[in-house]
Amino acid sequence: MQGEYIIKQISIFSENKPGRLAAIAEALEKSHVNIFAFSIAEANSFGVVRALVDKPDDARSVLEKLGFAVQFTDVIAVRMKDEPGGLHAVAQILGDAGINIEYAYAYSGKEAAVLILRVSQAGEAISKIQAAGGSLLRESDLG
Amino acid sequence: MHSWDPRIEEMPGAELEKIQYRHLKTLVYRLYSFSDFYHARMKEAKVHPDDIKTLADIRLLPFMYKSDLRDNYPDKLFCAPQNELVRYHVSSGTTGKPTVVGYTQKDIDLWTTSLARGLTSCGIGKGDVIQVSYGYGLFTGGLGLHYGAERIGATVLPTSVGNTERQIELMQDLKATAIACTPSYLIHIGEAADRMGVSIQKDTLLRSAIIGAEPWSETMRTRIYETMGVRAYDIYGTSEISGPMFSECSEQKGIHIWGDIAIPEIIDPDTGESLPPGEHGELVMTVLQKEALPIIRYRIGDLTQILDEPCPCGRTHPRIQRISGRVDDMLIIRGINVFPSAVEHAILSIPELSGHFMIEVDRKGSLDDMLVRVEMAPEALSDKINDLINIKRNVEHTLKNALNVAVQVELSEPGSLPRFEGKAKRVIDRRVF
């Protein structure tokens, strides 16, 4: 099943001004949501905060209550070797398959490094990575 | 004093009024007979050309509004066939529909004559080099001043707006003695010259400036004189009456409205009642000899007063005080009229937005800076920054097309902009004039 490797990322649209990230982080803290990985993309006056969390539904509802605009986005998370060439191996698989990476961010933990990817064709990316011997995370692995 | 046409300009008041009455009578008969629009309006107001028995009877005639031009877009109010027109100008309208003004050769000639008198009255003439730094094109400023300056035998340097460093170089190299532009652009030129190490006062021959198309003040006049050594003269007009058309004389004491060309009135904006000279109210203009787009009792929306006492210059025609404000919420951004309703109209056409918006106007340096905050529709949100940048660009592009002026755009979070019960206050104008 490819579906089990699709992970729900929360994407939060936010104006780029002091205090916005603190407000988001405080809300997640209060509702005991743990952040596994996150990134901010910004363009002038606005940005998008993207996060992988252990309880995405809780995170979404608490943020929406505060007036934030939140969306779920399908991403995949690939384990990388935490050593030189780890990123290259994953990126090469997708490049060879002609799959475009729309954006990516990474997390380097105790067990392994993890690359979170937003790609044009998630299903195809999953099969290519698996066929090349790569390892993907399930949403349950984020706990 | 040197006048372009002393016989007309210094004509005794009673004689001028006779000319005005004759022109008004002719105009009303012509429109009642040949314009469906005016015929219907006059019928509605139960006034017949025969009822106009004195000049003061102009008050019996119905008003004309900006919406009349918009509702009759593009040329339904024209009283001359297209093959008699020699030019169009187009300005932005109130709801996305622009306002089109057509000109016959006679219309252009009268406009030019009016400016020839005005420029001469400011002491400009043959031998002067006039840098025309108003925008050329659909906007009336550039071409209007261009023709007026040529008529008096001055040398025109048609620089239009922008490329300020080059404007300053040309001003020095070609020895410009006068400039026509918006007040804020003149200040901008002064500041840019400072940065270039050029003193307008010492390194150029610039001595007078014909400035208008946006609000300015006596404080600004003093500042321009003190920092640049330039005497600034106010010029007034709107595209509907032809363009920038009437100016101050060398006395700098109000704008002469040539009585054989136009009749200014002041009314109470709420009741429409006529107000006597010296009282402040809404300016209503009748242009007496216009052929292509006749203008009778047009409510421009500017606030001012008619000055009663004769001008020390000796010209006998009525004068108005500099414009003190607007009756509506129209903004003037870098000389271009911008209606918040037109912004709204443009924003409602963009599906990625919620429709809520705020307009913030500031002076950046000396130039107007208009920021439009728009609110994203929740369903248009994207986790991809490129999608958002594209939406922002599309909003900028749509607004630029609708308003004829570039504005800054900021995307706001859904639900974050103020909601209004009753009359919306969507404009924050922090400029000081």
Image: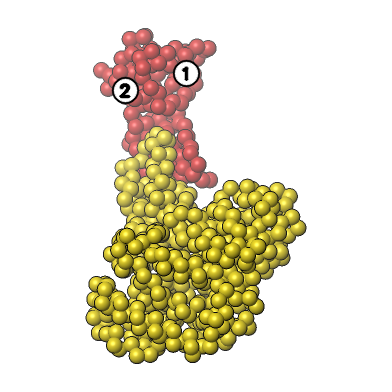
Chain colours: A red, B yellow
Q: Residue B161 location in percent, x, y?
A: 55, 53
The answer to whether one can see residue B159 in this image is yes
Note whether B410 is above or below B208 in the view shown: above
- The residue labelled by disc 1 is A113
**Chain letter for the residue marked with disc 1 in the picture:** A
Question: Amino acid under label 1?
Answer: Ala
Q: Quadrant of residue A97?
A: top left
Q: Secondary structure at mark 1?
A: strand
Question: Of the numbered discs in the image, which one, if any, rests on residue A103?
Answer: none
Along the viewing direction, whichever of B135 and B395 lies nearer the viewer = B135
Residue depicted at x 46% and y 42%: A46
Note whether A59 is above or below B122 in the view shown: above
Note whether B83 is above or below A119 in the view shown: below
Question: Amino acid under label 2?
Answer: Gln
Q: Residue B111 location in percent, x, y?
A: 47, 68
The answer to whether one can see residue B419 in this image is no
Mark 2 neighbour class, 10 Å CA radius: few under 14, some 14 to 19, many 20 or more:
few
